[in-house]
Image (tube, grey):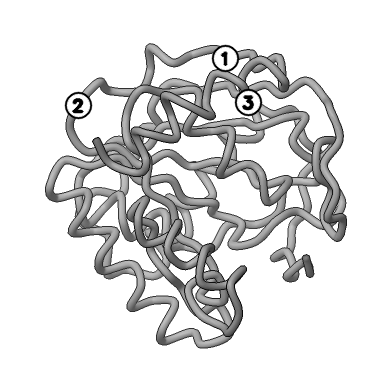
């Protein structure tokens, strides 16, 4: 049994109970085969609770800082990230961030499930921000279906900038796969990637009901 599976079976039930986790639309997520889960991003704990809504192993991108640094805490965090198969990304280096998409594409081509936050970082104020185009590149390059996801309540459990969690009800809603057929073959076309990414964000917004922000989000500390 992998570290991921062990945590799902041991800690998972407790976290679901504490968060009163409410799940809807899980029937839209394929039981097997490649899938891109495109989610809004409200809190660092999104990546803790979203996987609890599904039986599949979900891989995420994670800040490179989680994989490095001195001290016991960083070593434990790094071991956890590597043990659960997460992909490191250096968000301060654009080339490195783009290169980090390659192992995610490989994962999809092997039939895996990958979750991406198209906004690129957590929302600083609860609004839904403009998407980076990595979600479109992955979807159009791999041919994997894109399932929109709306998280809610996680920003009350652990708001950006806070370090101490508090109890709150969490909801995870999955939507129908986004129709990206008008953009097929456009992975290398910047305009097609932009339009496809905007289409994905429209689907997330419909699910989440968030106010839209027509700009890119800035990184949140914490």
Q: Secondary structure at mark 1?
A: strand
Determine which residue is flagged by label 3: 15
Determine which residue is flagged by label 2: 32
- Disc 1 from disc 2: Cα separation: 19 Å
Label drawn at residue 36: none
Q: Quick check: 216 above or below 152?
A: below
Which residue appears at 77% of the width and 35% of the height? 210
Q: Label 1 neighbourhood size at 10 Å, few (<14), some (14-19), many (20+)?
A: some
Query: In terms of depth relative to the viewer, which is nearer, 147 or 185?
Result: 147
* Image location (x, y in percent) of residue 162: 87, 55
Q: Quick check: 175 above or below 90?
A: above
Mark closest to the chain's N terminus, 1 or 2:
1
Which residue appears at 42% of the width and 63% of the height? 79
Q: Quadrant location of the N terminus? A: top left
Which residue appears at 80% of the width and 44% of the height? 158
Q: Are marks 3 and 2 in contact (CB under 8 Å)?
A: no
Q: Quick check: 105 above or below 202?
A: below
Q: Label 2 neighbourhood size at 10 Å, few (<14), some (14-19), many (20+)?
A: few
Q: Quadrant location of the C terminus? A: bottom right
Q: Label 3 neighbourhood size at 10 Å, few (<14), some (14-19), many (20+)?
A: some
Mark closest to the chain's N terminus, 3 or 2:
3
Residue 42 in sight: yes
Q: Secondary structure at mark 2?
A: loop
Query: In terms of depth relative to the viewer, which is nearer, 170 or 7?
Result: 7
- Position of residue 26 in the picture relative to residue 108 (left or right): right
Residue 126 in sight: no
- Position of residue 69 in the picture relative to residue 121 (left or right): left
Mark closest to the chain's N terminus, 1 or 3:
3
Determine which residue is flagged by label 1: 23
- Position of residue 107 in the picture relative to residue 37 (left or right): left
């Amino acid at each position: 049994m992998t570290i991921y599976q062990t945590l799902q079976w041991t800690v998972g039930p407790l976290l679901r109970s504490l968060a009163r986790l409410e799940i809807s639309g899980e029937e839209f997520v394929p039981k097997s085969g490649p899938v891109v889960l495109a989610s809004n991003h409200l809190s660092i704990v999104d990546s803790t609770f979203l996987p609890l809504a599904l039986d599949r192993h979900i891989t995420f991108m994670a800040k490179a800082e989680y994989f490095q640094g001195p001290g016991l805490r960083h070593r434990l965090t790094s071991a956890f990230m590597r043990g659960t198969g997460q992909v490191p990304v250096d968000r301060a280096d654009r080339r490195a961030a783009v290169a980090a998409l390659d192992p995610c594409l490989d994962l999809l081509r092997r039939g895996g499930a990958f979750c991406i936050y198209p906004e690129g970082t957590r929302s600083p104020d609860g609004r839904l921000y403009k998407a980076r185009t990595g979600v479109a590149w992955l979807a159009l390059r791999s041919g994997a279906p894109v399932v929109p996801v709306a998280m809610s309540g996680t920003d009350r459990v652990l708001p950006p900038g806070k370090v101490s969690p508090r109890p709150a009800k969490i909801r995870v809603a999955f939507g129908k796969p986004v129709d990206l057929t008008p953009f097929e073959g456009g992975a290398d076309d910047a305009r097609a990637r932009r339009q496809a990414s905007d289409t994905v964000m429209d689907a997330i917004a419909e699910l989440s009901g968030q106010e839209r922000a027509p700009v890119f989000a800035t990184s949140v500390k914490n």
